Image: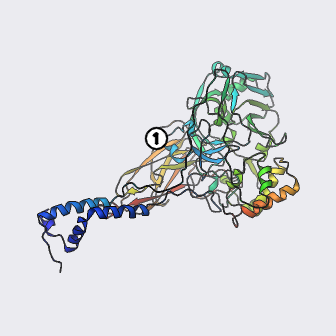
Amino acid sequence: MEQRRQNVSRRDALKLLSAAGGLTIVKWSRSTFAEQLPVNQEIEPFTGPGPNPHWNSVGPYVGEPQKAPLIGLTDRPVQLETPRSYFRSVFTPNDAFYVRWHLPDIPNRVDLAEWGLKIEGNVNKPLTLSFSELTEKFKPVSVTAVNQCSGNSRSRFQPRVAGGQWGNGAMGNALWTGVRLRELLDAAGVKQGSVQVQFQGLETGPGPQGSGSNVFLKSLELSDSALDEAVVAYLMNGEPLPMLNGFPLRLVVPGYFATYWMKCLTWIRVLATPDENFWMKTAYRVPDTLRGNTTPEEMKAGGVKTIAISRMPVRSFLISPDGSSKIPAGMNVTLRGIAFSGYGKIVKVEVSEDGTKTWREARLGEDHGAYSFRTWEAQWTPKIPRSYTLAVRATDEKGKVQPDEPVWNPGGYLWNKIEKQEIVVGKVSGGESR
Amino acid sequence: MRKRLSVLVPGAGLLLIAAGTAVFAQFQSGSYGSTKTNSLAQTISPQLSQDGNFSVASFPSFATELAEGEGRAETQSFCAMCHSTRYITMQPPLPAPTWDAEVNKMIKTFGAPIPDAAAKKIISYLQDHYTPENRKH
């Protein structure tokens, strides 16, 4: 201490002298600093023709019934995206769960004293089941499963494609409770020779009968093993479903994209011939190629064979840190995120601090079942102040690993490229960073 | 050659002030800029009856500002029959042929009852304002 005091240089002494006028300096500094503060800049109203660089889509926050402020893509039909921070929990809260409707006329009101689920078509005994019959006469089962829009992350496509310009938040994970679909089909008795089962909810539009703008219909093959795991759910995370997520009943098809998860499910129809309606024959189709990939040129040339979209390819996300704040150099931070696959359990999640050059394994969180989000975390102590490109990739039980190559198809479906996040590490006193 | 100065007892006071200033220089005390208020009003729980009706408030619709220009009125009235025009502004800038295909999809696939003349106007309006070459907002 003594030593240091004697070694104060003339320059330091000058600083000290000027500091004597401390108050003046403080006043002066305050106004100067205020001008230097960055402005809280509003996000751009649209992105493109390049890819959307943000984690979420760029819409404004909007308030809808039974919902926290979510990112509004469109108001009629309603499409809302879940902000990134909600994925810090393994179960997505109902009020933050994303919303996607196809047609403008959706219910604000359902009268449960009147409402009934109809099981009809090619069955021995057509049934209408009241809400209380569903909850009391059948054994309740629960499954944790990810619901992800087929077009989640569509705004990453290059070239861009028309459609809902989702960022990454058109997904959510919930505990769904209800009745096994097969049990309901058995109660009605599926007739010999039936091929598919069709689902219809309360979503309609003003379009002409028989067109896709009149009614939303989806079907699955009766022989599909996904039907063995499908549940007709009246509870979402232990609560009635929000109206916008399909109150009073929603079909849950673990592993499959959300297009099949019919909201406000009211008709289950067994078909003797394949469903040729617009939502099966024309929409929600993907090229019958590896990862559903094709090119605009191949599409133009024609003859790209397509199939109905089905299971979700493996994906993983870094949720925090999210890049919005700096990390002090030398500080240990926990990298946290989620991973899932429609093909089964996540077996490995790896993180990279150098933009995919080298990888190390993350620690997986609690297992909530093969079709749930699986949380992961990894420790990270960035020593040098600079910008880092973090990346994360997951592997599922089928051995499928997320690739670093993009996907392109005209519908904007099946995106599962490795996610990257720039993180800025700032200088601190005393460290290597000095 | 640096001259050494010995700092004596009065210097201690100066040092304290200096330290304070140095600490101050390392952070910025609260400062308030002027920005637009991006507010979203809270809502109250609705009155609930004990009958079978399970209802929620009407879903809000938002005003979408379409670019000024010839064909805007047709675009607003015909497209909004089935969806809000936010469906247009949400899109990235799309090439002219894509807008042509989109409008034709609405008519041929979805059965939108748009007369030929209006359809032509809508297509050129979209091509005049929402392509990579000309989109402004």
Protein chain holding label 1: A
Where residue A175 sits: x, y (%)?
A: 56, 33
Where residue A17 sits: x, y (%)?
A: 22, 69
| Residue nearest the observer in this picture, A65 or A349 | A65
Q: Which quadrant is home to the C terminus of chain A?
A: bottom left
- Look at the image and name its color scheme: rainbow
Q: Quadrant of residue A384?
A: bottom left
| Count of numbered badges drawn on the protein | 1
* B108, above or below A107, in the image: below
Where residue A371 sits: x, y (%)?
A: 57, 39
Q: Identify the residue shown where x is 82% and y is 33%.
A: A272
Q: Is residue B102 visible?
A: no
| Residue nearest the observer in this picture, A307 or B34 | B34
Disc 1 target residue:
A365
Q: Identify the residue shown where x is 70% and y is 53%.
A: A289
Q: Is residue A338 visible?
A: yes
| Residue nearest the observer in this picture, A201 or A16 | A16
* A357, above or below A349, in the image: below
Question: Within 10 Å of the Cα at label 1, are there few (<14), some (14-19), or many (20+) other Cα atoms?
Answer: some
Q: Which quadrant is home to the N terminus of chain A?
A: bottom left
* A365, above or below B65, in the image: above
Q: Quadrant of residue A199?
A: top right
Which residue is farthest bottom? B1
Q: Quadrant of residue A24?
A: bottom left
Side (left or right) of B25 relative to A85: left
Where residue A294 sits: x, y (%)?
A: 70, 58
Secondary structure under tag 1 reads loop
Could you tell me the amino acid type at mark 1? Gly
Side (left or right) of A74 relative to A3: right
